[in-house]
Amino acid sequence: MSRLGARVTWICPTITLLLATACSNPTDHPASSSYDDLVALFHEWREFERPTFLDGVPDYSPAAMAAQHRELADYQGRLGAFDTSAWTVEQQIDHHLVRAETNGLDFDHRVRRPWARNPSFYTMIFTSRSDVPAHEGPIIHGWIDLWTYEYPLNDDDAAELAERIGAIPGVLEHAQENLIEDARDLWVGGIRTMAAQSNDLAGFANQVAGTSAELDAAIMRAREATNEFRAWLEGELPSKNGPSGVGKDNYTWYAHNVHLVPYTWEEQLTIMRRELARAHSSLRLEEHRNRDLPQLEQVASAAAYDRVFNAAVTEYMRFLEGEDIVTVRDYMDAALRARIGQFSPSEGIRGFFSEVSYRDPLTMRTHGHHWIELANMDLDPHSSEIRRVPSLSNIYDARSEGLATGMEEMMMHAGLFDDNPRARELIWILLAQRAARAIGGLMLHANELTVDETTQFASEWVPRGWLPADGATIVGEQHFYLQQPGYGTSYVTGKVQIERLMAERAIQLGDNFTMKGFMDEFTAAGVIPVSLVRWQLTGRDEEVIRMTTGQMGGPP
């Protein structure tokens, strides 16, 4: 039995949670040692986390949010009252996942407060699926995933969308009442986000025109309301001069208590700087090694695009199976092939990731491990009801993004690009981009740089001029990382954690260690924080203990 499982896992907020509201003592709640009771509480918690709706509009008013925060302490007290000493490691991990979710909502009320300071929180329309288990960043309840519907729409779906899209004007009207805090960079980003929503609504209007008069009218009104809201944001912008970051101490608390990432703000900065330097130096060595080889040519036609991108999927799947990297399942090939996309002609820079994949599509198939994982979640859901659904607050980010990013370099070292040495250069450029933008995200949350300054920094440190400072890629990324503390660094912190776990597991198993065995057991644990996967695979829980008892960095 783990040391953590040998005791009741209640930890008073005065030690780690530091709630602004009352400390709900577990003695106020009946103790339970039943895992089934935890599952029941989890479902109740998920309902509680969802705000009440008034005429289709979620209530994020100051009064409603204050009431929710007061009641949150009761849920945390009930969680703390569980006696998990007789539970399996897997069940104890589920307890920590629920605890982390409640900490995330607490942090939102105390620090992030997206409903009061982040206009992008009120974005409702999403046209495509994210490559991680849920939406990236804070998201309003009532969001509309247009990609989940089948087109052309049937009558029932058209009526449903007319009703849901019809709520957007009310949502944005309430947003003007709720957005009372001063966070300039978040405000600027919100203006761009609402311009994007307006464009998405215009495109959707064209796509479904004539399907339903009610839907056509709802889309028109929603777009008008979006444009009016954007104009209001622009009018208010001159009065917004306050910082948007959460601060270093809050960032560390969030990493330890919500995302269960065992690094402080300062440690993450050190890791990012090290990885940025390693990426650049390794790139120069690769370029020197390949100096007599021809440069990679970009895909130049739609026919060539379809041919080489499909061939890349075939080659990658053959490599994974032939080299015993992971157990290959039927749906993996289809998951990657479905995300190939289509050729886009361009006379300039297409966008950073296209600059990479148009030179060698195989490189980004490795990062496409995201889509394999999503297919796995859809088709082979985890046995745990708590793990089979995406965690709130993007708690999965370092696990999900860390594995996808890690697969790039790990597959390179495993020999995937041995027949195409120039492609190895692209892997180092990808790592440099991830580290550079992560440093910017850290500086944003420390309130030491603005979004514009971080985009300039990232552009300077990404090789070959593929990341213009004013380009949509880096501007959108930095705004997103400002909304979601820890996401910008998650690609690298997760990769570093996975690399360490692989090393520890290899030492544990000795000659019995295999790459395929490691990858399969890592995947089977679910898309949960790497620190929890480490506990499940190795039995080592000291990281989790230190984070949950406040021994890693102080509270904010």
Image: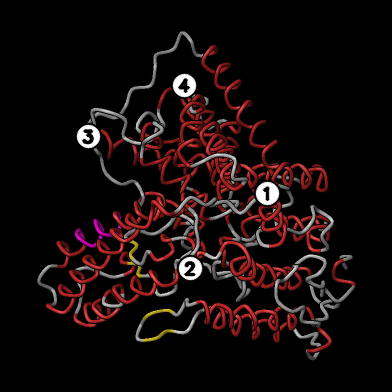
Residue topped by disc 2: 115
What's the magenta region? 196-203
Q: What's the residue type where badge 1 is placed?
A: Lys
Q: Is residue 139 above or below residue 279?
A: below
In this rendering, which labeled residue sits more in front, label 2 or label 4?
2
Question: Where is residue 97, by image quadrant?
Answer: bottom right
- If you read the primary sequence from the N terminus, does the residue marked by circle 2 or circle 4 appear first? 2
What mark, if any, has residue 422 been given in the picture?
4
Q: In front here: 404 or 261? A: 261
Residue topped by disc 1: 248
Q: Report whether 285 appears left or right of 504.
A: left
In this rendering, which labeled residue sits more in front, label 3 or label 4?
3
In this rendering, which labeled residue sits more in front, label 3 or label 2?
2
Q: How many residues crowd mark 2 within 10 Å: few (<14), some (14–19), many (20+)?
A: many
Q: Secondary structure at mark 4?
A: helix
Residue topped by disc 3: 345
Q: How many residues crowd mark 3 within 10 Å: few (<14), some (14–19), many (20+)?
A: few
Q: Position of residue 521 (x, y in %)?
A: 67, 56
What mark, if any, has residue 306 been given in the picture?
none
- If you read the primary sequence from the N terminus, does the residue marked by circle 1 or circle 2 appear first? 2
